[in-house]
Image (cartoon, helix red, strand yellow):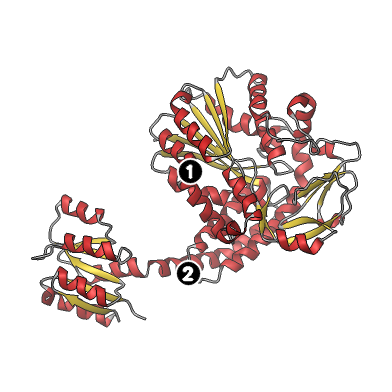
Amino acid sequence: MNAKILWVDDEIDLLKPHIIFLEQKEYNVDTAVSGNEALDMIEEADYDIVFLDENMPGLSGIETLERLKSKFPSVPVVMITKSEEESIMEDAIGSNIADYLIKPVKPNQILLCLKKNLENKKLVSEKTTMAYQQEFQKLSMEISDDLDYHEWTEVYKKLVRWELSLGKSVGSGMEEVLKMQKDEANQQFTRFVMNNYESWVNARDDERPVQSHTVMKKKVFPVLDSNKPTFLFLIDNLRWDQWKSIQPFFEDAFKLVSEELFYSILPSTTQYARNSLFAGLMPSEIQKKYPQYWMNENEEGSKNQFESELLGELLNRFGKDTKYSYHKVLNMSFGRKVVSSLPNLMNNDLNVIVYNFVDMLSHARTEMEIIKELADDEAAYRSLTVSWFEHSPLYEMIRYLGDKDVNLLITTDHGSVRVNNPIQIVGDKNTNTNLRYKVGRSLNYKAKEVFEARTPEKLFLPRTQMSDSYVFAKTNDFLAYRNNFNHYAKYYRNTFQHGGISMEEMLIPFISMRTK
């Protein structure tokens, strides 16, 4: 069905050539000579767009616009005027117009305006789809190539960029093709990690990617030398695509300094990766050096209750005379307390704020039917993250800091992957409950289906008992016990989990910004 246009102008007869031109382009055009007539016509018919003269006798264009928008806020309105006065432009733009044209208008200006406002999504969708089709083969060749750890981060960024772009397209049909390509990339990435992980954790810093235990030294410490307050926000379980979705909220006040991905250690979970990040040590090193700050899998209580102490020890080991604070936000009320404390925090060299909402969101999506429906797929999961962020105390903190001279760092401890393929595993009653990795002494599984660490000390993983070993799920698999297997397979399929090996879990953002 062709677009239906209402053109409102008290001198509409003079615009007859323009109307004939649009009708030849197969647009349907109705006309009105006053604001009141236009409002009556809009009550009776559905219009895709309205062209509105600003200077009309009786009800002016601005007054007509205000009444029209109060009843039909979604109808795009293009204001047309002879005046170039700034105040009139501001009044029109403030009333949420779709476009603004100065008389005399030319037919091609009108046509361009229509395409921009009515066909923009379709044109962008077609162009995006064509661009991805052209790059598909090139990206496939990259994925199958012998990539290094830096090249894998670039491939993942490209895949996410296409995922976000195609997600805005209307019925392109390419989303499924991209999903298949991303699945293939995850399989290749998993093989890459399995082949190289042990060498990374045993190599010198310059021979391996930045990992959880080297982030503070490599990325945070250099920023502390700038002699201005540094705020490090660790948003638990924040994936790269989620960061790209909330990034626009930062752009008005902050200038991007760097935007990188680093590698989470294994297991890609809070207990291991976040403790490692703040300690600057691998898990078994924390257990050995600071046993009072390490909680084993089988111990009761929070496994991350000593992050502030580990951070203090790290600063001391590196001789950093740094005045710092540490806050962990687990709920909105405490988040608001942190907002109110920001003026005092400006006196510190480093302020670390751990925000747990995204991690809670992924767990809630598993346990709560309403969240499952709201975050039914990857796009909805991102959308829910954006909605939360926009109304969160965290965003209040960001807005406050936007007016100050500070360094702003955004990172996370791990990401999460949407799982759909159950793998059978057997363990005794002491085996941990995580679906993406298991640690225990009596694990039974098919070796080819997992990444196994029979000698955990080679990966700097702690043992509770000498016979303990670790296994990690790959790509989008999850580990389910043989007993009642079908029930758990159905219950956890299509939930977001972390702890194993995938791009989404292990390739995670580190963002550095400063106020403009």
Q: Residue at x 15, y 64 (%)?
A: 103
Q: In the rendered image of this protein, does residue 372 appear above or below residue 270?
A: below
Image quadrant where one finds the N terminus: bottom left
Quadrant of res 69:
bottom left
The answer to whether 419 appears left or right of 79 in the picture is: right
The answer to whether 405 appears left or right of 353 in the picture is: left
**Label 1: few (<14), some (14–19) or many (≥20) C-alpha neighbours in 10 Å:** some
Q: Position of residue 499 (x, y in %)?
A: 72, 47
Tell me the tag on residue 392. 1
Q: Which residue is mark 2?
A: 170
Q: Position of residue 334 (x, y in %)?
A: 53, 35
Q: In the rendered image of this protein, does residue 472 appear above or below residue 222?
A: below
Between residue 101 and residue 473, name the one nearer to us. 473
Q: Residue at x 68, y 47 (%)?
A: 148
Quadrant of res 21:
bottom left
The secondary element bearing badge 2 is classed as loop
**Label 2: few (<14), some (14–19) or many (≥20) C-alpha neighbours in 10 Å:** some
Residues at circles 2 and 1 in contact by the CB criterion of under 8 Å: no
Mark 1 belongs to which amino acid? Ser
The secondary element bearing badge 1 is classed as loop
Please say whether residue 143 is visible from this viewpoint: yes
Mark 2 belongs to which amino acid? Val
Q: Position of residue 56 (x, y in %)?
A: 11, 65
Please say whether residue 208 is visible from this viewpoint: no
Answer with mark 2 or mark 1, whichever residue precedes in sequence: 2
